[in-house]
Image: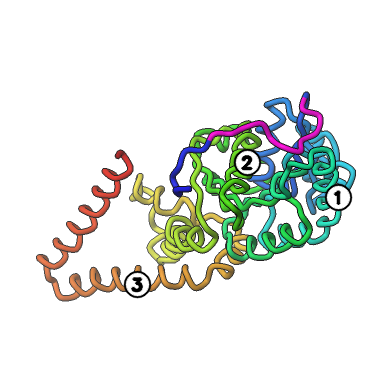
Amino acid sequence: MDGRASLRGTAPAGACDRSRPTVGIVGLGLIGGSFARAYAAQGWRVRATDIDQATLDAARIEVVEGELDDAAIARCDLIVLAAYPDACVSWLEAHAGVLSRAAREAREADPTLPACVAGPLVIDTAGVKEAVCERAFRLARAEGFAFLGTHPMAGTEMSGFAYARADLFAGAPMVLVPPALDDIARLMLLDRALELLRPAGFGSFSVTTPADHDRVISFTSQLAHVVSNAYVKSPTAQEHHGFSAGSYRDLTRVAHLNARMWSELMIDNARNLSQEITHLICALSAYRDALEDRDTERLRALLAEGDRIKRALDDTRRD
């Protein structure tokens, strides 16, 4: 299936209590909390767990109906792993037996179901996919439960449940990263995922591999955070008040970040991100050299080249 193919959902397989479906959330930060709010707003039953008891208690007052324990896992239609990459895999490893039993019971009720769509569908929302999917795909295949890598392309510079919004994903792109399956099983898995993700309100879906996801995301997301974070380290940043407007705000927005989370994501994708930083350093060096040489023509050509590339990229997006 083409990476930009349009996907349409069908009724999810192996689900329970279709009158009121259940979503399980692991991690109630910005992303997990926003999933919880979005699904609760659509009438879903929300079960959740978080390493911070105070966060879980606050969520239970607003949107969470109970903890995501083993009994609740088996009753879930969808489980969203919204934690750090290693924590996502650790949760899967700890609960593989429960997921396996739930999938087996679903297949016993309907022997036509392949393992990839039986029982709860588990997705992760981590910002890197190779580090998660390699282990998760292997575990799901060995234990016989349904797993799909995903990456919602939405967020803010703020983190935590307090900033979670039910409309965070409204209209946003969603990247789907399926395991290696035959064409029919793959289509069934993707169709089921689209149906179960409908309450979040995503605007578009694309399908890719873990390697391609991480290569592109190193440029579109991780490099942007590194550049923004490095930019504010200029001594001149202390004097920007009264001299800054949209350009400063745009470039510094993502300098504010969760250092623990982003460092894990970047280390997991170190080869790709390092390569993108090298490309940027080479490009910046060309501008610096033109300035030091007072070479107006070379600087004009560099600026015009960047402007031309940006316009072409914008034209491609409109197409």
Rendering coords of residue 255 (x, y %): 49, 57
| Left or right of 99 in this view: 124 | left
Which residue carries the number 3 mark?
281
Q: Secondary structure at mark 3?
A: helix
Q: Is residue 25 visible?
A: yes
Which residue carries the number 2 mark?
193
Residue 240, picture quadrant? bottom left
Q: Decide whether residue 133 is among the magenta residues.
A: no
Q: Main secondary structure of the magenta part?
A: loop
The answer to which of 141 and 61 lies nearer the viewer is 141
Q: Which residues are magenta?
A: 8-18
Rendering coords of residue 311 (x, y %): 24, 48
Amino acid type, mark 3: Ile
Query: What residue sits 57% from the left and 53% below the top?
Result: 177
Instruction: Give the crowd class for mark 3: few <14, some 14-19, many >=20 residues within 10 Å.
Output: few
Which residue carries the number 1 mark?
101
Q: Secondary structure at mark 2?
A: helix
Rendering coords of residue 274 (x, y %): 45, 72
